[in-house]
Amino acid sequence: MITICVSDEIKNACSAFAGAAIYAKVKNTPHNEKLWEQIDISINEYKANHQLEDIKKNPVIAATRAVYKKLGKDPNRYRPSAEALCRRIIRELGLYQIDTLVDLINLVSIKTGYSIGGFDADKIEGNVLTLGVGKENEPYEAIGRGMMNIDGLPVYRDNVGGIGTPTSDNERTKIELNTTAFFALFNGYNGKEGLVDAVNYMKSLLVEFAEAEEIQVIYY
């Protein structure tokens, strides 16, 4: 299992921070109809019960936005991924269908407000990740966005460099159809409340839709 260290930069910006990581051996698929039935139900429930202005009231999203501001990053320009997903739903833009692993991560984000990093564990260099803060001109190729300015963003780094921020993960370590070693990171900038429930929900989805085995969870 990968060890995760939280830097003093993050602790000073958010003393309440609590994180969780899930590792599992999995089988990814291009599309899972039963998973998408659950996603569609969640989308319709979210639309029925939320307005655009409600999204930022989610305590997990609100806390993530507050940390961005404290670190000097504009959360309206670099939205946390969970907020971006919820905004797509309210604006009737729908969700991208990527693959089963990515789709189930998105479902957990919609239901909980956590901006979750999802990675192919075999692509992570070394066995330690450090959660720190992005630096000026630090190179970072975001998935589907090209080079992204991560100066002031919380960022997980392996031995090579940044692999994940709450706004976007990195192309280098992204989940693909041939991914068999799944690794996910939950960023609880609001503290521990709701974290265990969110982790258990993802575990159940991984078992049901990705044939997950050898599941390991650490809290940090």
Image (cartoon, rainbow, N blue to C red):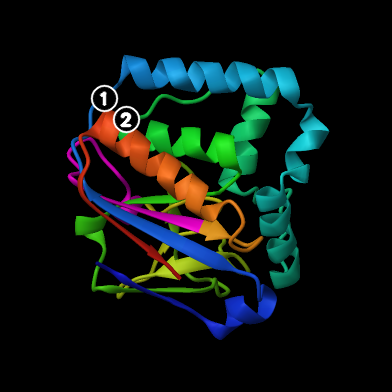
Q: Position of residue 171 (x, y in %)?
A: 35, 51
Confirm whether the magenta stretch covers residue 182. Answer: yes
- The picture places residue 144, in percent across and down from the top left corner, at 44, 41
Q: Is residue 77 visible?
A: no
- Residue to which mark 1 is pinned: 30
Q: Quadrant of residue 128?
A: bottom left
Describe residue 184's horizontal placement relative to residue 96 as left or right: left
Element marked by disc 1: loop
Q: Is residue 69 left or right of residue 126?
A: right
Residue 79 in the figure: left or right of residue 144: right
Q: Which residue is mark 2?
A: 100
Marks 1 and 2 in Cβ contact (< 8 Å): yes
Q: How many marks?
A: 2
Looking at the picture, which amino acid does disc 2 mark?
Thr
Depth check: 157 or 24 in front? 24
x 25%, y 57%: residue: 121
The span picked out in magenta is 171-186
Q: Position of residue 179 (x, y in %)?
A: 20, 43
**Image vertical order of residue 71 relative to residue 34, above or below:** below
User: Which image quadrant for residue 206?
Assistant: top left
Q: Amino acid at mark 1?
A: Pro
Kindly state the secondary structure of the residue where label 2 is placed: helix
- The part of the image, by quadrant, that contains residue 63 is bottom right
Q: Say which residue appears at 49% left-offset and 53% top-offset.
A: 196
Q: Which quarter of the rendered picture does the C terminus lie within?
A: bottom left
Residue 102 shows in this picture: yes
Location of residue 8 in the rendering, given as x and y in whole percent from the top left corner? 57, 84
Instruction: Determine the residue positioned at 74% across, 61% down.
Output: 66
Would you call the spot at circle 1 few (<14 residues within 10 Å), some (14-19), or many (20 or more)? some
